[in-house]
Image: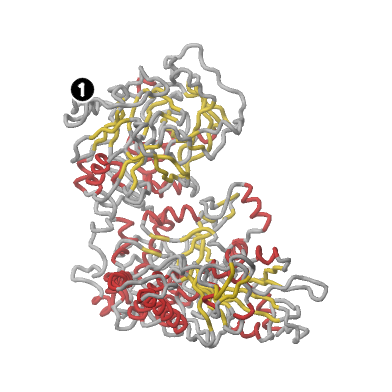
């Protein structure tokens, strides 16, 4: 199928009226003829159709046995339906697996015979409970028994350096050689024909070939070697041309259709006696689309019956097998490529960072080597240029000590794969069945107007595993045919714990071909700020990448159907006017129901008393904590910076709840600990990085990795309170005694360590064992509290206009900018959309204050219209000026209720729908020309004066204002 063409009608739909998603019967009924609807099939009913199969797949209560009960792990509502099946909303019928299998012209295999796939998943991959993992082309997963067997091996044996001669070293050497034999056996060959060179991965193997191939530079007697590669190649293949360019060797990309045309013509070189070496590289399977290219090309090119281009010489073939061999057997006794690079984690999941280059022994003597490392020399002299390499290919090219323990782990990988599946042919058939079923079901999904829900990028119609691997590449469309950016699809999938891959997948050639991206567009996208791997998914309405799902040997029908339900839930639920309801407290990663009910709000309600009421008035902490804490001097001095004990009503500021009064600041929040609860204030000092102490601390795990609510929703239940006079931060949480930490480090005793936040290196220090123990008890796993060092300057990536190179804004531990501002009319509009979608209409599902808290902004303003803040170029608050840096692109954190830690996908879903699929809400600010000679403050009730992007004229401050923001 060519990119962008209309999808064919699935075979199972031909000859009958096409089902419209919003008109079909709900799931759970009998399918016509035989089989059941979604939830049937081998994963649910032992692979048999009809009523008997349906009965065997269901409990007496009428639920599939393998699905959780309502209110269990997945919760209720749409997420429960996506993850667990069951009754579906109107318009969500999917192709029943039994019907799909019966309609196939060839037998389809699912599972591994008498080996129970369900038992294997529970026993070997229990960590996948509640997760749909569909990125096996990126990295497959290792089974528990493989890791257990390997660790037992390490505990029972002593493996020394294989370059030594002692007993433990001899054991290592012999085991490594046995693994080499096992690898060759796996690919149906032996040491007589191939050698195994261990590398750091397939990329390192490709680099080795580029550097060692016997290239001939152009000269008087020849035009030199040619390096040809298929356009549909991985970045690491294309990158070989940098090596050839340095040798003045011509690199030529060729299109698949050109190679097929050469195959048809039977093009041969004009001079069969010419031995000028050329290299042709192509993938056995495209890592972009899963297209499988003919292995017969190897023999045709090597024999001279087919040439990528008509030049005299001898062609060698490199088969990039990294993607292909993860789910398919490769017989090198039949298809004798000269070079075959591999990455073993693609096959076994573990170990990572280990690959190999399989070299045809007939070619090995031609390879040239410049550098030599430890273990590769038979003899050499340190004082002069004398070096004799070792005889075997592996010993010559494996510089230094190989990763021998990882090599030993491969033996356990082969054992586990054979024991669990019976071999690669079974994996090939199983994974293709899942891919073909998912492809067919996706093709059948239509909007009520008949428009397709997805656009699939493929060169095949998934007719057989010989031409297509278990990879589906696509973009989601709206009902008008407009592409929804891959970043938004990825964010929505994360809400359902569905793991996909997005972008261009390190294959720019295939990405350009299928998405219609010209070379000039690539350059323009780069100028617009888009780089490989970011989340800039649409530029001028054109996609920069796509979404990819891929299946592995442990993938199940339930995985495929959960993904299909997700696509329906994301797109087609609008047909029935149903929102995505909130999940239940039983959801994975969310606090328990009791915690949610007992949680203390992170901010102070407008009519409530101070959060300090239950604490001693002298220090604000319980009696077992110190009443005074030593701290270094603060800059700027803060004699007047005390927290107001009661938040005034917004009506006093001239603003109705979410109303349309004058533009003033209605609320101020800082978040002392990154991803923890807000601390609401009425007046607060400005520091060089934003509001003083905003996101100055962060919680990290045992590996020092910063935690966020995406991984740990209960962070929002941690409530920090800043006491400026006492120079301490008091931290509270339900069920925990309050604890205090000093606001500043003790310079003499503090040990600085380096951490990473949003790809930036930051200097931090550990706040001590006491708070670490407190956090670890609360979360149930080791945690530490780190604070950004006060003398460390983290520069902002976004530069303010008219800012000199030496005056870049500095940041705390924030993600993007010093401040985040949201506008109440914008929140009100979203609130009305959310509450209008409540089918019952009995209660306000999202109170204004709760909805505001989800966006974790620093400055909340009143305004005159929704989203007017996105038209602002800068704002003035008193004598303070702030530059607007752009919109805040939202992630799934806005789905978390900041008072309970519970998730509700409605917020993200509704925002995505209403904002043309770009989930932007709020704007980033940075202050400009801030004078630190005297303290500066922001305060609630201060007037906000914006300057529009189209308007360069500044609003002037009134001569007298009721709320003065800058206090000298």
Question: On the picture, is 206 further left or further right than 708?
Answer: right
Question: Where is mark 1, residue-wise?
Answer: 617
Answer above or below: position of 912 versus 298.
above
Residue found 41% across the figure and 50% down from its top: 909
Closer to us: 156 or 62: 156
Asked whether residue 257 is in view, the answer is no
SS under mark 1: loop
Give the vertical position of 782 relative to 617 (above or below): below
User: Residue 725 placed where, x, y %?
Assistant: 30, 22
Residue 165: where, in percent of width, then height?
Answer: 41, 75
The way the protein has been coloured in the rendering is secondary structure
566 w.r.t. 415: above or below:
above
Q: What residue is drawn where x is 20% and y is 31%? A: 625
Query: In the figure, residue 348 lies in which quadrant?
Result: bottom left
**Left or right of 790 in this view: 220:** right
Residue 620 visible, this orientation: yes
């Amino acid at each position: 199928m060519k990119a962008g063409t209309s999808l064919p009608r699935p075979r199972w739909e031909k000859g009958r009226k096409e089902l419209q998603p919003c008109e079909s019967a709900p799931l759970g009924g009998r399918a016509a003829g035989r089989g059941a609807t979604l939830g049937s099939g081998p994963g649910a009913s032992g692979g048999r159709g009809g009523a008997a199969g349906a009965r065997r797949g269901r409990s007496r209560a009428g639920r599939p046995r393998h699905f959780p009960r309502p209110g269990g792990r997945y919760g209720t509502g749409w997420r429960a339906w996506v993850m667990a099946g069951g009754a579906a909303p109107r318009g969500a019928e999917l192709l029943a697996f039994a019907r799909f299998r019966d309609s196939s012209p060839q037998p389809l295999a699912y599972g591994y015979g008498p080996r129970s796939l369900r038992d294997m998943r529970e026993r070997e991959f229990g960590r996948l409970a509640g997760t749909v993992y569909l990125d096996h082309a990126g990295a497959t997963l290792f089974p528990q028994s493989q890791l257990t067997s390997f660790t037992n091996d390490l505990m029972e044996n002593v493996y020394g350096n294989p370059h030594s001669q002692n007993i433990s070293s001899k054991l290592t050497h012999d085991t490594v050689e046995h693994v080499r034999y096992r690898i060759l056996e796996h690919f149906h060959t032996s040491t007589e024909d191939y050698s195994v060179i261990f590398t750091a991965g397939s990329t390192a193997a490709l680099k080795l070939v580029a550097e060692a191939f016997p290239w001939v530079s152009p000269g008087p007697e020849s035009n030199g070697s040619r390096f040809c590669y298929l356009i549909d190649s991985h970045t690491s293949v294309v990158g070989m041309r940098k090596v050839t360019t340095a040798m003045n060797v011509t690199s030529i990309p060729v299109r698949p259709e050109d190679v097929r045309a050469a195959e048809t013509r039977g093009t041969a070189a004009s001079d069969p006696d010419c031995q000028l070496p050329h290299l042709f590289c192509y993938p056995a399977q495209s890592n972009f689309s899963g297209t499988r290219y003919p292995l017969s090309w190897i023999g045709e090119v090597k024999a001279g019956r087919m040439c990528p281009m008509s030049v005299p010489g001898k062609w060698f073939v490199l088969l990039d097998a990294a993607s292909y061999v993860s789910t398919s057997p490769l017989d090198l006794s039949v298809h004798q490529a000269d070079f075959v690079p591999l990455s073993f984690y693609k096959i076994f999941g573990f170990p990572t960072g280990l690959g190999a280059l399989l070299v045809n022994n007939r070619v090995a003597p031609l390879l040239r080597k410049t550098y030599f490392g430890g273990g590769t020399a038979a003899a050499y002299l340190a004082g002069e240029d004398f070096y004799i390499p070792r005889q075997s290919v592996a010993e010559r090219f494996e510089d230094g000590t190989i990763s021998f323990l990882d090599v030993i782990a491969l033996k356990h990988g082969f054992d586990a794969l054979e024991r669990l599946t019976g071999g690669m042919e079974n994996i090939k058939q199983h994974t293709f069945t899942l891919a073909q079923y998912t492809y067919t079901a996706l093709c059948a999904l239509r909007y009520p107007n008949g428009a397709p829900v997805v656009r699939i990028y493929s060169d095949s119609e998934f007719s057989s595993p010989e031409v297509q691997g278990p990879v589906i590449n696509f973009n989601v469309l709206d009902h008008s045919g407009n592409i929804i950016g891959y970043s938004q699809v990825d964010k929505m999938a994360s809400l359902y714990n569905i793991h996909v891959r997005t972008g261009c997948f390190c294959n720019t050639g295939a990405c350009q071909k299928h998405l219609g991206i010209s070379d000039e567009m690539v350059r323009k996208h780069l100028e617009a700020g888009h780089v490989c791997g970011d989340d800039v998914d649409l530029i001028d309405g054109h996609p920069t990448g796509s979404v990819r799902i891929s299946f592995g040997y442990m993938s199940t029908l339930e995985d495929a159907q959960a993904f299909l339900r997700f696509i329906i839930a994301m797109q087609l639920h609008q047909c029935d006017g149903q929102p995505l309801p909130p999940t239940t407290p039983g959801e994975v990663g969310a606090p328990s129901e009791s915690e949610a009910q007992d949680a203390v709000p992170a901010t102070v309600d407008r009519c409530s008393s101070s959060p300090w009421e239950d604490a001693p008035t002298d220090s604000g902490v319980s009696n077992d904590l110190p009443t005074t804490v030593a701290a270094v001097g603060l800059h700027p001095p803060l004699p007047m910076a005390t927290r107001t004990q009661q938040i005034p009503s917004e009506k006093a500021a001239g603003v109705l709840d979410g109303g349309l009064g004058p533009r003033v600041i209605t609320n101020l929040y800082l978040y002392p600990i990154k991803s923890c609860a807000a601390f609401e204030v009425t007046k607060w000092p400005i520091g060089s990085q934003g509001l003083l102490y905003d996101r100055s601390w962060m919680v990290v795990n045992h590996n020092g990795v910063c935690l966020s609510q995406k991984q740990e929703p209960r962070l929002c239940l941690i409530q920090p309170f800043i006491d400026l006079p006492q120079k301490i931060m008091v931290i509270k949480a339900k069920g925990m005694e309050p604890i205090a930490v000093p606001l500043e480090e003790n310079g003499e005793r503090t040990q600085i360590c380096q951490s990473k936040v949003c790809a930036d290196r930051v200097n931090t220090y550990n706040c001590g064992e006491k708070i670490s123990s407190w956090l670890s008890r609360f979360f149930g796993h080791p945690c530490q509290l780190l604070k950004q060092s006060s003398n460390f300057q983290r520069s902002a990536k976004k530069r303010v206009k008219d800012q000199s190179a030496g005056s870049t804004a500095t940041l705390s531990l924030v993600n993007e900018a010093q401040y985040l501002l949201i506008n109440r009319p914008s929140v009100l509009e979203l609130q009305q959309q959310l509450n209008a979608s409540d089918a019952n209409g009995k209660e306000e599902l999202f109170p204004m204050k709760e909805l505001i808290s989800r966006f974790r902004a620093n400055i909340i303003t009143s305004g005159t219209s929704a989203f007017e803040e996105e038209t602002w170029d800068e704002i003035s608050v008193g004598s303070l000026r702030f530059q607007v840096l752009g919109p805040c692109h939202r992630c799934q954190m806005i789905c978390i209720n900041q008072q309970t830690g519970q998730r509700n996908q409605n917020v993200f879903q509704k925002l995505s729908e209403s904002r043309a699929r770009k989930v932007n809400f709020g704007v980033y600010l940075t202050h400009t020309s801030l004078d630190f000679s005297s303290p500066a403050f922001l305060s609630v009730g201060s007037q906000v004066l914006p300057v529009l992007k189209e308007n360069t004229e500044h609003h002037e401050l009134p001569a007298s204002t009721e709320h003065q923001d800058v206090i000298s």
